[in-house]
Image (cartoon, rainbow, N blue to C red):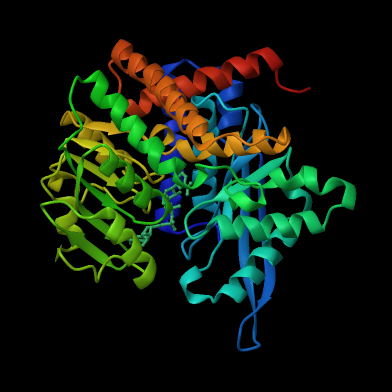
Amino acid sequence: MTGTASSTLLYQEATANVEDAARAIDMDQKVRRVLLKPMNELIVNFPIQRENGEHEVLQGYRIQHNNVLGPFKGGMRFHQGMDLNESRALATWMTFKCALLNLPFGGAKGGVAINPAHYGTAELERVVRRFTHALGENIGPEFDIPAPDMGTDAQTMGWMMDTYLNSRGPGERQNARRVVTGKPVELGGSLGRESATGRGAAYALRHLYGQLDRTLSGQSAAVQGFGNVGSHVAAAFTELNMKVVAIADISGVVYNPEGLDIAKLTLHASQHRGVATFDACDTITPEEFFALDVDVLVPAALESQITAENVNDIRAHTIVEAANGPVTAEASKVLEEAGLNLIPDILANAGGVVVSYYEWVQNKTSSRWTARDIDSRLRDAIWDASDRVWSIRNDRGCSWRQAAYIEASNLLQKVYRLRGIFP
Ligand code: NAD
Protein backbone atom coordinates (compact mmCIF):
# COMPACT_ATOMS: atom_id res chain seq x y z
CA MET A 1 0.00 0.00 0.00
CA THR A 2 1.34 3.48 -0.83
CA GLY A 3 0.15 5.12 2.32
CA THR A 4 -2.53 6.02 4.80
CA ALA A 5 -3.31 9.61 5.72
CA SER A 6 -0.88 9.39 8.64
CA SER A 7 2.03 7.80 6.73
CA THR A 8 1.52 10.28 3.88
CA LEU A 9 1.75 13.11 6.41
CA LEU A 10 4.88 11.51 7.86
CA TYR A 11 6.55 11.43 4.45
CA GLN A 12 5.53 15.04 3.84
CA GLU A 13 7.21 15.94 7.13
CA ALA A 14 10.38 14.11 6.12
CA THR A 15 10.56 15.94 2.80
CA ALA A 16 9.79 19.23 4.61
CA ASN A 17 12.84 18.58 6.84
CA VAL A 18 14.95 18.29 3.69
CA GLU A 19 13.38 21.37 2.05
CA ASP A 20 13.90 23.36 5.21
CA ALA A 21 17.61 22.50 5.42
CA ALA A 22 18.04 23.09 1.67
CA ARG A 23 16.67 26.61 2.09
CA ALA A 24 18.83 27.28 5.13
CA ILE A 25 22.09 26.37 3.40
CA ASP A 26 21.05 27.59 -0.04
CA MET A 27 21.60 24.07 -1.34
CA ASP A 28 22.38 23.49 -5.02
CA GLN A 29 19.10 22.77 -6.83
CA LYS A 30 20.37 19.50 -8.27
CA VAL A 31 21.45 18.19 -4.85
CA ARG A 32 18.12 19.25 -3.36
CA ARG A 33 16.24 17.41 -6.10
CA VAL A 34 18.30 14.26 -5.59
CA LEU A 35 17.81 14.29 -1.81
CA LEU A 36 14.07 14.77 -2.10
CA LYS A 37 13.49 11.42 -3.83
CA PRO A 38 14.46 7.92 -2.72
CA MET A 39 16.85 6.25 -5.19
CA ASN A 40 15.22 2.83 -5.19
CA GLU A 41 11.82 1.61 -4.02
CA LEU A 42 11.08 -2.07 -3.75
CA ILE A 43 7.79 -3.81 -2.92
CA VAL A 44 7.72 -7.58 -2.54
CA ASN A 45 4.67 -9.80 -2.12
CA PHE A 46 5.52 -13.22 -0.73
CA PRO A 47 3.58 -16.20 0.65
CA ILE A 48 4.01 -17.76 4.06
CA GLN A 49 2.32 -20.73 5.62
CA ARG A 50 0.42 -20.19 8.88
CA GLU A 51 0.24 -22.79 11.65
CA ASN A 52 -3.25 -23.84 10.45
CA GLY A 53 -1.81 -24.80 7.05
CA GLU A 54 -3.33 -21.79 5.24
CA HIS A 55 -1.11 -19.62 3.06
CA GLU A 56 -1.14 -15.86 3.32
CA VAL A 57 0.54 -13.36 1.01
CA LEU A 58 2.36 -10.58 2.85
CA GLN A 59 3.70 -7.29 1.56
CA GLY A 60 7.25 -6.15 2.33
CA TYR A 61 9.13 -2.96 1.50
CA ARG A 62 12.68 -1.73 1.14
CA ILE A 63 13.32 1.90 0.34
CA GLN A 64 16.91 2.85 -0.49
CA HIS A 65 16.92 6.60 -0.12
CA ASN A 66 20.52 7.60 -0.81
CA ASN A 67 24.00 6.03 -0.88
CA VAL A 68 26.33 8.89 -1.66
CA LEU A 69 28.13 8.41 1.68
CA GLY A 70 28.25 4.60 1.63
CA PRO A 71 26.08 1.46 1.52
CA PHE A 72 22.36 1.89 2.25
CA LYS A 73 21.69 1.35 5.95
CA GLY A 74 18.53 1.14 8.01
CA GLY A 75 16.15 -0.97 10.00
CA MET A 76 13.52 -3.51 9.11
CA ARG A 77 10.20 -2.83 10.83
CA PHE A 78 7.43 -5.37 11.37
CA HIS A 79 4.27 -3.41 12.08
CA GLN A 80 0.73 -3.44 10.76
CA GLY A 81 1.06 0.25 9.84
CA MET A 82 4.08 -0.31 7.59
CA ASP A 83 3.63 0.94 4.02
CA LEU A 84 5.49 2.67 1.24
CA ASN A 85 5.21 6.21 2.59
CA GLU A 86 6.21 5.24 6.12
CA SER A 87 9.25 3.44 4.67
CA ARG A 88 10.10 6.48 2.52
CA ALA A 89 9.95 8.82 5.50
CA LEU A 90 12.07 6.56 7.68
CA ALA A 91 14.61 5.96 4.89
CA THR A 92 14.97 9.71 4.27
CA TRP A 93 15.65 10.30 7.96
CA MET A 94 18.33 7.56 7.91
CA THR A 95 20.31 9.38 5.19
CA PHE A 96 20.45 12.51 7.33
CA LYS A 97 21.13 10.59 10.54
CA CYS A 98 24.15 8.82 9.04
CA ALA A 99 25.42 12.10 7.56
CA LEU A 100 25.02 13.90 10.91
CA LEU A 101 27.01 11.19 12.66
CA ASN A 102 29.67 11.19 9.94
CA LEU A 103 29.13 7.49 9.20
CA PRO A 104 30.12 6.03 5.83
CA PHE A 105 26.54 4.86 5.26
CA GLY A 106 23.53 5.99 3.28
CA GLY A 107 19.89 5.73 4.28
CA ALA A 108 17.33 2.94 3.85
CA LYS A 109 14.35 1.46 5.66
CA GLY A 110 11.88 -1.32 5.13
CA GLY A 111 9.84 -4.02 6.70
CA VAL A 112 6.70 -6.06 6.50
CA ALA A 113 3.10 -4.97 7.07
CA ILE A 114 2.19 -7.40 9.88
CA ASN A 115 1.45 -7.30 13.56
CA PRO A 116 4.18 -9.65 14.86
CA ALA A 117 2.18 -10.29 18.06
CA HIS A 118 -0.31 -12.26 15.92
CA TYR A 119 2.36 -14.72 14.70
CA GLY A 120 4.04 -17.59 16.51
CA THR A 121 7.84 -17.92 16.57
CA ALA A 122 7.95 -20.53 13.80
CA GLU A 123 5.65 -18.41 11.64
CA LEU A 124 7.80 -15.32 12.21
CA GLU A 125 10.88 -17.26 11.20
CA ARG A 126 9.16 -18.20 7.93
CA VAL A 127 8.16 -14.55 7.38
CA VAL A 128 11.76 -13.38 7.87
CA ARG A 129 13.23 -16.07 5.65
CA ARG A 130 10.73 -15.58 2.80
CA PHE A 131 11.07 -11.79 3.01
CA THR A 132 14.89 -12.05 2.89
CA HIS A 133 14.64 -14.48 -0.02
CA ALA A 134 12.30 -12.08 -1.85
CA LEU A 135 14.73 -9.19 -1.32
CA GLY A 136 17.43 -11.32 -2.98
CA GLU A 137 20.33 -9.28 -4.32
CA ASN A 138 18.72 -6.04 -3.16
CA ILE A 139 20.53 -6.35 0.18
CA GLY A 140 24.22 -7.12 0.65
CA PRO A 141 27.18 -6.45 2.96
CA GLU A 142 28.53 -3.64 0.76
CA PHE A 143 25.19 -2.60 -0.71
CA ASP A 144 22.28 -2.46 1.75
CA ILE A 145 22.59 -3.53 5.38
CA PRO A 146 19.39 -4.05 7.44
CA ALA A 147 19.15 -3.84 11.24
CA PRO A 148 16.40 -4.30 13.86
CA ASP A 149 13.64 -1.73 14.29
CA MET A 150 10.17 -1.80 15.75
CA GLY A 151 8.79 -5.35 15.96
CA THR A 152 12.11 -6.97 15.02
CA ASP A 153 15.14 -7.92 17.12
CA ALA A 154 18.49 -9.70 17.18
CA GLN A 155 16.80 -13.05 16.44
CA THR A 156 15.18 -11.55 13.32
CA MET A 157 18.63 -10.46 12.15
CA GLY A 158 20.01 -13.93 12.89
CA TRP A 159 17.40 -15.53 10.58
CA MET A 160 17.93 -12.86 7.97
CA MET A 161 21.69 -13.38 8.00
CA ASP A 162 21.37 -17.17 7.85
CA THR A 163 18.97 -16.99 4.88
CA TYR A 164 21.21 -14.57 3.02
CA LEU A 165 24.36 -16.65 3.69
CA ASN A 166 22.65 -19.76 2.39
CA SER A 167 22.16 -18.03 -0.94
CA ARG A 168 25.94 -17.39 -1.23
CA GLY A 169 28.68 -19.74 -2.38
CA PRO A 170 30.58 -21.47 0.46
CA GLY A 171 33.66 -19.26 0.00
CA GLU A 172 31.69 -16.05 0.42
CA ARG A 173 29.69 -16.91 3.49
CA GLN A 174 31.92 -15.84 6.39
CA ASN A 175 32.63 -12.52 4.76
CA ALA A 176 28.95 -11.81 4.18
CA ARG A 177 27.89 -11.95 7.85
CA ARG A 178 27.92 -8.18 7.94
CA VAL A 179 24.89 -8.15 5.60
CA VAL A 180 22.92 -7.32 8.76
CA THR A 181 23.82 -5.61 12.02
CA GLY A 182 22.13 -5.95 15.39
CA LYS A 183 22.47 -9.74 15.22
CA PRO A 184 23.12 -11.88 18.33
CA VAL A 185 26.67 -11.54 19.67
CA GLU A 186 27.24 -15.28 19.13
CA LEU A 187 26.58 -14.81 15.39
CA GLY A 188 29.03 -11.92 15.04
CA GLY A 189 26.93 -9.17 16.60
CA SER A 190 28.58 -6.41 18.58
CA LEU A 191 28.66 -6.03 22.32
CA GLY A 192 26.64 -2.96 23.25
CA ARG A 193 24.44 -2.94 20.13
CA GLU A 194 21.26 -3.86 21.94
CA SER A 195 21.50 -0.99 24.42
CA ALA A 196 23.11 1.46 21.95
CA THR A 197 20.04 3.44 20.88
CA GLY A 198 18.85 3.95 24.46
CA ARG A 199 22.33 4.77 25.76
CA GLY A 200 22.90 7.14 22.85
CA ALA A 201 19.72 9.03 23.78
CA ALA A 202 20.97 9.32 27.37
CA TYR A 203 24.35 10.61 26.14
CA ALA A 204 22.58 13.24 24.02
CA LEU A 205 20.62 14.33 27.10
CA ARG A 206 23.84 14.48 29.18
CA HIS A 207 25.41 16.71 26.54
CA LEU A 208 22.44 19.08 26.61
CA TYR A 209 22.44 19.31 30.40
CA GLY A 210 26.21 19.92 30.34
CA GLN A 211 25.78 22.82 27.93
CA LEU A 212 22.97 24.24 30.04
CA ASP A 213 25.08 23.78 33.18
CA ARG A 214 22.36 21.75 34.85
CA THR A 215 22.58 18.50 36.75
CA LEU A 216 20.71 15.37 35.69
CA SER A 217 20.80 13.59 39.03
CA GLY A 218 17.31 13.71 40.59
CA GLN A 219 15.57 14.83 37.39
CA SER A 220 12.29 13.05 36.72
CA ALA A 221 11.45 11.36 33.43
CA ALA A 222 8.59 9.62 31.63
CA VAL A 223 9.30 7.18 28.79
CA GLN A 224 6.80 6.03 26.18
CA GLY A 225 7.76 2.63 24.75
CA PHE A 226 9.48 -0.13 26.72
CA GLY A 227 10.92 -2.16 23.86
CA ASN A 228 14.52 -2.15 22.73
CA VAL A 229 14.91 1.62 22.83
CA GLY A 230 12.66 2.66 25.72
CA SER A 231 13.85 -0.01 28.17
CA HIS A 232 17.49 0.96 27.63
CA VAL A 233 16.71 4.68 27.89
CA ALA A 234 15.07 4.00 31.25
CA ALA A 235 18.00 1.83 32.42
CA ALA A 236 20.53 4.49 31.36
CA PHE A 237 18.52 7.20 33.14
CA THR A 238 18.54 5.09 36.31
CA GLU A 239 22.36 4.84 36.05
CA LEU A 240 22.41 8.65 35.95
CA ASN A 241 20.38 8.77 39.20
CA MET A 242 17.37 10.15 37.41
CA LYS A 243 13.92 9.17 38.62
CA VAL A 244 11.86 7.38 35.94
CA VAL A 245 8.32 7.92 37.21
CA ALA A 246 6.23 6.65 34.29
CA ILE A 247 6.49 4.10 31.50
CA ALA A 248 3.90 3.66 28.75
CA ASP A 249 3.71 0.75 26.33
CA ILE A 250 1.04 -0.94 24.21
CA SER A 251 -0.35 -2.69 27.32
CA GLY A 252 -0.88 0.50 29.38
CA VAL A 253 0.87 3.12 31.49
CA VAL A 254 2.48 2.63 34.90
CA TYR A 255 3.26 5.55 37.20
CA ASN A 256 4.99 5.93 40.52
CA PRO A 257 5.96 9.46 41.61
CA GLU A 258 8.72 7.98 43.80
CA GLY A 259 10.34 6.36 40.76
CA LEU A 260 9.87 2.93 39.18
CA ASP A 261 12.29 0.04 39.74
CA ILE A 262 13.39 -0.34 36.11
CA ALA A 263 15.25 -3.64 36.58
CA LYS A 264 12.14 -5.25 38.11
CA LEU A 265 9.87 -3.66 35.52
CA THR A 266 12.06 -5.01 32.70
CA LEU A 267 11.76 -8.53 34.07
CA HIS A 268 8.01 -8.11 34.57
CA ALA A 269 7.45 -6.76 31.03
CA SER A 270 9.35 -9.67 29.48
CA GLN A 271 7.29 -12.21 31.47
CA HIS A 272 3.89 -10.53 30.99
CA ARG A 273 4.17 -9.05 27.48
CA GLY A 274 4.07 -5.47 28.78
CA VAL A 275 4.24 -3.21 31.78
CA ALA A 276 0.51 -2.87 32.59
CA THR A 277 0.19 -5.41 35.40
CA PHE A 278 3.29 -4.25 37.33
CA ASP A 279 2.49 -3.65 40.98
CA ALA A 280 3.85 -0.92 43.28
CA CYS A 281 2.52 1.75 40.95
CA ASP A 282 -0.63 3.47 39.74
CA THR A 283 -2.06 3.15 36.27
CA ILE A 284 -2.83 6.30 34.30
CA THR A 285 -4.19 6.98 30.83
CA PRO A 286 -2.01 7.79 27.79
CA GLU A 287 -3.44 11.34 27.89
CA GLU A 288 -2.37 11.74 31.53
CA PHE A 289 1.05 10.31 30.64
CA PHE A 290 1.84 13.12 28.20
CA ALA A 291 0.61 15.74 30.68
CA LEU A 292 2.80 14.53 33.58
CA ASP A 293 4.76 17.13 35.49
CA VAL A 294 8.20 15.68 34.72
CA ASP A 295 11.49 17.24 33.65
CA VAL A 296 12.22 14.97 30.70
CA LEU A 297 9.76 13.28 28.36
CA VAL A 298 11.01 10.54 26.03
CA PRO A 299 8.77 9.25 23.24
CA ALA A 300 10.43 5.93 22.34
CA ALA A 301 7.60 4.05 20.59
CA LEU A 302 5.75 5.28 17.52
CA GLU A 303 5.77 8.34 15.27
CA SER A 304 3.31 11.26 15.61
CA GLN A 305 2.68 10.90 19.35
CA ILE A 306 3.01 14.57 20.25
CA THR A 307 0.71 16.48 17.93
CA ALA A 308 -1.28 19.72 17.76
CA GLU A 309 -3.92 17.95 19.88
CA ASN A 310 -1.82 17.19 22.96
CA VAL A 311 1.18 19.54 22.67
CA ASN A 312 -0.33 22.15 24.97
CA ASP A 313 -0.67 19.53 27.74
CA ILE A 314 3.09 18.92 27.87
CA ARG A 315 4.72 20.08 31.10
CA ALA A 316 8.21 18.61 30.62
CA HIS A 317 10.91 21.14 29.70
CA THR A 318 13.00 18.70 27.67
CA ILE A 319 11.95 16.18 25.05
CA VAL A 320 14.27 13.49 23.75
CA GLU A 321 13.00 12.00 20.47
CA ALA A 322 14.21 8.44 20.95
CA ALA A 323 11.62 7.18 18.43
CA ASN A 324 11.64 8.30 14.80
CA GLY A 325 9.31 11.20 14.11
CA PRO A 326 7.40 11.16 17.42
CA VAL A 327 6.72 14.92 17.41
CA THR A 328 4.88 16.39 14.41
CA ALA A 329 6.20 19.53 12.72
CA GLU A 330 3.25 21.53 14.02
CA ALA A 331 3.85 20.39 17.59
CA SER A 332 7.63 20.96 17.29
CA LYS A 333 6.95 24.58 16.40
CA VAL A 334 4.77 25.06 19.47
CA LEU A 335 7.40 23.47 21.72
CA GLU A 336 10.21 25.54 20.22
CA GLU A 337 8.23 28.76 20.67
CA ALA A 338 7.52 27.80 24.27
CA GLY A 339 11.28 27.50 24.83
CA LEU A 340 11.39 23.73 25.39
CA ASN A 341 14.52 21.80 24.55
CA LEU A 342 13.91 19.15 21.91
CA ILE A 343 16.71 16.75 21.01
CA PRO A 344 15.73 15.69 17.49
CA ASP A 345 15.44 12.06 16.46
CA ILE A 346 18.33 12.03 13.99
CA LEU A 347 20.62 12.87 16.91
CA ALA A 348 18.75 11.37 19.88
CA ASN A 349 18.35 7.85 18.47
CA ALA A 350 21.51 7.70 16.36
CA GLY A 351 23.29 5.46 18.87
CA GLY A 352 21.82 2.36 17.19
CA VAL A 353 23.29 3.06 13.79
CA VAL A 354 26.58 4.22 15.31
CA VAL A 355 27.10 0.85 17.02
CA SER A 356 25.73 -0.93 13.93
CA TYR A 357 28.63 0.70 12.10
CA TYR A 358 31.04 -0.59 14.78
CA GLU A 359 29.54 -4.08 14.31
CA TRP A 360 30.02 -3.86 10.55
CA VAL A 361 33.67 -2.75 10.98
CA GLN A 362 34.35 -5.54 13.50
CA ASN A 363 32.90 -8.12 11.06
CA LYS A 364 34.91 -6.66 8.20
CA THR A 365 38.16 -6.80 10.14
CA SER A 366 37.41 -10.06 12.05
CA SER A 367 37.90 -8.25 15.33
CA ARG A 368 36.01 -7.93 18.57
CA TRP A 369 35.97 -4.73 20.58
CA THR A 370 35.24 -4.63 24.30
CA ALA A 371 31.93 -3.36 25.67
CA ARG A 372 33.78 -0.52 27.40
CA ASP A 373 35.55 0.51 24.19
CA ILE A 374 32.25 0.51 22.27
CA ASP A 375 30.44 2.53 24.90
CA SER A 376 33.15 5.19 25.07
CA ARG A 377 33.27 5.44 21.26
CA LEU A 378 29.46 5.75 21.23
CA ARG A 379 29.57 8.53 23.83
CA ASP A 380 32.25 10.42 21.86
CA ALA A 381 30.30 10.07 18.59
CA ILE A 382 27.06 11.40 20.15
CA TRP A 383 28.86 14.21 21.96
CA ASP A 384 30.77 15.22 18.83
CA ALA A 385 27.54 15.43 16.79
CA SER A 386 25.81 17.22 19.70
CA ASP A 387 28.63 19.81 19.82
CA ARG A 388 28.19 20.53 16.12
CA VAL A 389 24.39 20.79 16.38
CA TRP A 390 24.67 22.98 19.49
CA SER A 391 27.02 25.44 17.79
CA ILE A 392 24.85 25.73 14.63
CA ARG A 393 21.80 26.33 16.78
CA ASN A 394 23.60 29.05 18.72
CA ASP A 395 25.09 30.69 15.62
CA ARG A 396 21.85 30.72 13.65
CA GLY A 397 19.26 30.90 16.42
CA CYS A 398 17.38 28.08 14.70
CA SER A 399 15.63 25.03 16.19
CA TRP A 400 17.53 21.91 17.28
CA ARG A 401 15.97 20.00 14.42
CA GLN A 402 16.95 22.58 11.82
CA ALA A 403 20.49 22.69 13.21
CA ALA A 404 20.82 18.90 12.91
CA TYR A 405 19.52 18.91 9.32
CA ILE A 406 21.78 21.82 8.37
CA GLU A 407 24.85 19.98 9.66
CA ALA A 408 23.90 16.77 7.81
CA SER A 409 22.99 18.64 4.63
CA ASN A 410 26.29 20.51 4.56
CA LEU A 411 28.16 17.20 4.40
CA LEU A 412 25.84 15.69 1.78
CA GLN A 413 26.15 18.79 -0.39
CA LYS A 414 29.94 18.84 -0.05
CA VAL A 415 30.16 15.21 -1.12
CA TYR A 416 27.92 15.80 -4.16
CA ARG A 417 29.98 18.84 -5.12
CA LEU A 418 33.21 16.85 -4.94
CA ARG A 419 31.85 13.84 -6.80
CA GLY A 420 29.57 15.63 -9.24
CA ILE A 421 26.35 14.06 -10.43
CA PHE A 422 26.80 11.34 -13.05
CA PRO A 423 27.06 11.56 -16.06
P1 NAD B 1 10.24 -2.31 19.89
O1 NAD B 1 9.34 -3.06 19.00
O2 NAD B 1 11.36 -3.01 20.56
O3 NAD B 1 9.38 -1.60 21.06
C1 NAD B 1 8.30 -0.78 20.77
C2 NAD B 1 7.64 -0.34 22.07
O4 NAD B 1 6.60 0.59 21.78
C3 NAD B 1 6.99 -1.49 22.84
O5 NAD B 1 7.21 -1.33 24.22
C4 NAD B 1 5.51 -1.32 22.52
O6 NAD B 1 4.65 -1.84 23.54
C5 NAD B 1 5.42 0.20 22.47
N1 NAD B 1 4.22 0.66 21.75
C6 NAD B 1 3.75 0.24 20.56
N2 NAD B 1 2.61 0.86 20.25
C7 NAD B 1 2.36 1.71 21.28
C8 NAD B 1 1.34 2.64 21.57
N3 NAD B 1 0.32 2.82 20.73
N4 NAD B 1 1.41 3.35 22.74
C9 NAD B 1 2.43 3.17 23.59
N5 NAD B 1 3.43 2.31 23.37
C10 NAD B 1 3.40 1.59 22.23
O7 NAD B 1 10.77 -1.08 19.02
P2 NAD B 1 12.11 -0.24 19.23
O8 NAD B 1 13.20 -0.91 18.48
O9 NAD B 1 12.28 0.07 20.67
O10 NAD B 1 11.77 1.09 18.40
C11 NAD B 1 11.04 2.17 18.98
C12 NAD B 1 11.28 3.41 18.15
O11 NAD B 1 12.67 3.72 18.10
C13 NAD B 1 10.83 3.33 16.68
O12 NAD B 1 10.41 4.62 16.27
C14 NAD B 1 12.12 2.98 15.96
O13 NAD B 1 12.10 3.35 14.60
C15 NAD B 1 13.10 3.80 16.75
N6 NAD B 1 14.50 3.38 16.64
C16 NAD B 1 14.87 2.11 16.97
C17 NAD B 1 16.21 1.76 16.89
C18 NAD B 1 16.70 0.40 17.32
O14 NAD B 1 17.92 0.23 17.39
N7 NAD B 1 15.86 -0.54 17.65
C19 NAD B 1 17.16 2.68 16.43
C20 NAD B 1 16.74 3.96 16.11
C21 NAD B 1 15.41 4.30 16.23
Please state the horizontal and vertical placement of residue 24, each as a whole percent of the image.
Answer: 41, 18
Q: Is residue 158 above or below residue 319?
A: below
Q: Nearer the viewer, residue 237 or 112?
A: 237
User: Is residue 156 in view?
Assistant: yes
Q: Which quadrant of the figure contains the C terminus?
A: top right
Q: Nearer the viewer, residue 324 or 206?
A: 206
Q: Is residue 4 left or right of residue 289?
A: right
Q: Is residue 135 left or right of residue 155?
A: right
Quadrant of the rendered image holding ligand 1: bottom left
> What residue is rendered at 16% in x and 39% in y?
295
Q: How many marks?
A: 0
Image coords of residue 25 (percent x, y): 45, 16
Tell me the residue at 13%/50% (across/down).
292
* In the image, farthest residue toward the bottom: 52
Left or right: residue 195 versus residue 139 is: left
Residue at image position (48%, 62%) is 79
Is residue 375 depicted above or below 308 in this figure?
A: above
Q: Residue at x 37, y 25 (%)?
A: 402
Res 283 seen here: no
Q: Position of residue 422 (x, y in %)?
A: 76, 23
- Closer-to-camera residue (124/314): 124
Q: Quadrant of the N terminus?
A: bottom right
Residue 63 position within the rendered picture, expressed as x and y whole percent measured from the top left: 61, 47
Q: Is residue 208 above or below residue 322?
A: above
